[in-house]
Image (cartoon, grey):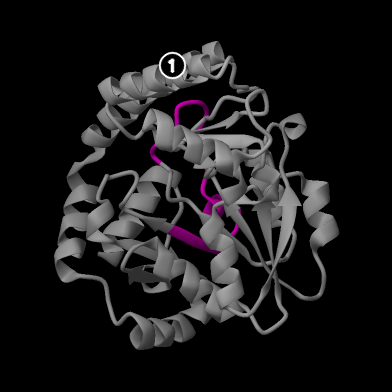
Amino acid sequence: MRKEIAAFHQREYGVVVDPDCMVVTSGSSPAILLVLMLLCNPDSEVILSNPGYACYRNFVLAAQANPVLVPLNEATGLQYNMEAIRKCVTPRTAAIFINSPMNPTGMLLDESFLKEIASLGVPIISDEIYHGLVYEGRAHSILEYTDQAFVLNGFSKRFAMTGLRLGYLIAPKPCMRSLQKLQQNLFICASSIAQQAGIAALRQAGPDVERMRQTYDERRRYMIDRLREMGFGIKVEPQGAFYIFANARKFTSDSYRFAFDVLENAHVGITPGIDFGTGGEGYVRFSYANSLENIKEGLDRLSRYLSLRGF
C-alpha cells in the first residue's frame, strides 16, 4: 500500500516520498488526530482558517491545544492572507493547518502561497483530501516545496471510497517512530480489505476519476447559475471539492435557523455557515455530490421556498 502511494505521489506531483515515511490509517480523520497528538502539548497553538472544516478545531481541542483562527473573507477571495498568518505565529505555535481545495469554500491555494508558507519554519499540516477534484487551476502538494511537512490524504473523495475508511499520513522521517506507536495503540491498522481496494484504485481508477471530475464540474456550473438566479451571492467561484459556499445575507442573518427552516419546509439539506466558524455566518454550504436530477429537484424546491417567503 505504501509503495503504491509513493508511486502515486511521484506521478501526480513529481515528488519522491519514502514509503517508510507514511502511516496508513482508517480514513483521514485518524491521521489528523495522530499528527496533532504528535505535535501538540497543553497550551500549544494551531493556526486554522475561519471559516474552515469544523472537525479541525475539535481535533485541536482534543489534543489539548488552542485553535488560533485566521479570518477568510470575500475581499481576499476567501483565501488565507499570509500577513494575517505571520501575525498569529508565536513561540507556542505547534502547526499551521491548511486545506486545498478547501472545505467549505472550494478554493484552491496557489503555488506562491504554498512556497511562502513552506518557508516559515513552522510545521505545516496539509489536508489534500480533495485533490483530484479540481476544475480550475492545478492542485499542488505542499511536498513540492518542503519535505518537512505533514500531508493528510485518503480515498473517500478522489476515489469515492467513503465507506471503506482508508487514508494516510506522510510525515518527516524523524517523526515516524512516534507516529507508529500512536497508531498501534489507538487504531492498530487500516482494514486489509480496504487497502487492497486502495491499491487497485491507485493503479487503475485514473480514467474513472477524470470522468467523475467532469461530471462534478457540470453540476458545479449548473448549481452556481441557479443559485445566482435565486439571489445567493457567489462572488468567488469554487475551484475544487464539491461545495459552493454561498452568501445568504439577502435572506437571513442566522444561517443555522435558515438551514433548518429550509430543511423542514422545502425538504432540502444545506449546511449553515456558522458550523464552519464565526467567519461563516451569513453563508450556507451547498454540495453537488449528488445526481444532476436530484440537484435540479432540490434547487426547484429551494426556489419555491424563497418565493413563498417573498424573496
Point 50% across, 26% down: residue: 136
Point 52% across, 28% down: residue: 137
Q: Is residue 223 visible?
A: yes
Horizontally, residue 66 falls left or right of residue 88, namely left
Q: Nearer the viewer, residue 273 or 138?
A: 273
Q: Nearer the viewer, residue 102 or 1?
A: 102
Judge whether 113 appears above or below 200 on screen.
Answer: above
Judge whether 61 appears above or below 248 on screen.
Answer: below
Indicate the position of residue 208 as horizontal and vertical percent values: 22, 34
Indicate the position of residue 185 as horizontal and vertical percent values: 37, 88
Point 57% across, 41% down: residue: 257
Residue 138 part of the magenta segment: yes
Judge whether 9 appears above or below 27 on screen.
Answer: above
When asked about the image quadrant of residue 304, the answer is top left
Indicate the position of residue 39 as horizontal and vertical percent values: 60, 77
Horizontally, residue 3 falls left or right of residue 104, namely left
Point 39% across, 52% down: residue: 9
| Helix, strand or loop: magenta stretch | loop
Q: Nearer the viewer, residue 116 or 309?
A: 309
Which residues fall within the magenta stretch? 132-152
Judge whether 7 appears above or below 301 on screen.
Answer: below
When asked about the image quadrant of residue 17, the answer is bottom left
User: Which quadrant would the C terminus be assigned to in this image?
Assistant: top right
Residue identified by numbered label 1: 304
Q: What SS does tag 1 mark?
A: helix
Indicate the position of residue 129 as horizontal and vertical percent values: 43, 50
User: Which quadrant would the N terminus be assigned to in this image?
Assistant: bottom left
Callout 1, which amino acid?
Answer: Arg
When asked about the image quadrant of residue 293, the answer is top left
